[in-house]
Image (cartoon, rainbow, N blue to C red):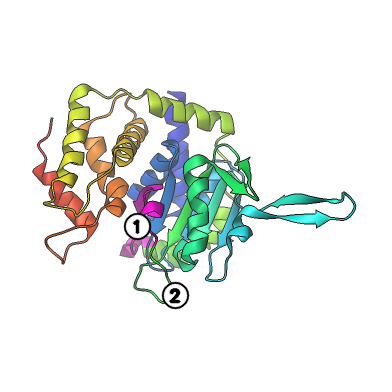
Amino acid sequence: MQAQIKLKSLLNQLNTVLVGKEPQVQDGVACLLAGGHLLIEDVPGVGKTTLAHALAKTFGLQFSRVQFTSDLMPSDLSGVSVYERGREAFVFHPGPLFAQVLLADEINRASPKTQSALLEAMEEKQVTIDGQTRALPSPFFVIATQNPHDQVGTYALPESQLDRFHMRISLGYPDRLAERELLAGVDRRDLVEKLPSLLTEGELQQLQQLVQQIHVAAPLLDYVQDIVAATRNGRWFAQGLSPRAGIAVLRAAKAQALLSGRDYAAPDDVQAILAQTAAHRLIPVGDAGRGSVEQVRAMLDAVALP
């Protein structure tokens, strides 16, 4: 009961900042509760950075923000060793990567070399610098924003990088009522700066443990396996979901169940998060006019319910 009250408070606070985006806010919270990294993709100016900043503040975690640009170097993220004459030794100065939440703003404006510097950090929660492996803080989340690939000055994220993101969401334009509130209301940046932290590290760990304890019945496991198999049969996608992606789908569904106030996962939870968890990992075939999200939904309709 206490967990549900806490989760409701989290969602309510975030929804005061991101007006009219309740499904996307819940997806973002579910992603972090599942222990995954979040990618927010959309055109500039619709609230991507605001959501990322609000999530970090509300979860009460130490965070840093990096504006990714074409001249950003890997060492700008991880840090550098500098020779200090007084110590007569090289001393490591950690970069912004050494935070519990890294806000990677416009991640696809950085070069592929810099993007690849995040791979080890996102997967292993560590970085190797000058031959020495250094652990990152725990928990460690990357919340990245990116612009559509057809915009000037962007580099497409490689498949290996995309696969490290647990979920990808898109905010879209607000409806008329929500946009009116944005136009007439307080500046969202001022609201974000004043947001109180609603979780401690211990409370976050407890919520993540609750996600792991969500019951998954055998028929639901069959359903997830059927979905994964459908992505691999060549009808919908050029390449199917990996076992790691299947695990990500299940973890996100369990987080969705917790947010819905249940101690068990249901097919509705899988359907609610599938496109956000799987679409960025898949390349559609067949109808060239369809995007991967639409193709995932069409495939889902063809998979029998348990």
179 left or right of 60 in image: left
Do we see residue 266 in this rendering?
yes
Residue at (21% x, 35% y) in the render: 224
Residue located farthest toward the right when viewing the structure as drawn: 86
Q: Where's the N terminus, which quadrant? A: top left
Q: CA distance from mark 2 to mark 1?
A: 20 Å
Query: Is disc 2 placed on a helix, strand or loop?
Result: loop
The image position of residue 209, as x and y in percent, is: 45, 26
Q: How many marks?
A: 2
92 left or right of 183 in image: right
The answer to whether residue 184 is magenta is: no
Give the crowd class for mark 2: few <14, some 14-19, many >=20 residues within 10 Å.
few
Q: Nearer the viewer, residue 58 or 211?
A: 211
The image position of residue 6, as x and y in percent, is: 47, 32
The image position of residue 292, as x and y in percent, is: 23, 57
Mark 2–mark 1 CB contact (< 8 Å): no
Q: Which is closer to the viewer, label 2 or label 1? A: 2
**162 to 138, vertically: above or below:** below
Give the crowd class for mark 1: few <14, some 14-19, many >=20 residues within 10 Å.
some
Residue located farthest toward the front when viewing the structure as drawn: 131
- Disc 1 target residue: 170
Query: Is disc 1 placed on a helix, strand or loop?
Result: loop
Indicate the amino acid at tag 2: Gly
Residue located farthest toward the bottom when viewing the structure as drawn: 152
Q: Which residues are magenta?
A: 157-178
The image position of residue 140, as x and y in percent, is: 54, 42
**239 to 201, vertically: above or below:** below
Do we see residue 51 in this rendering?
no
- Disc 2 target residue: 153
Q: Nearer the viewer, residue 103 or 227?
A: 227
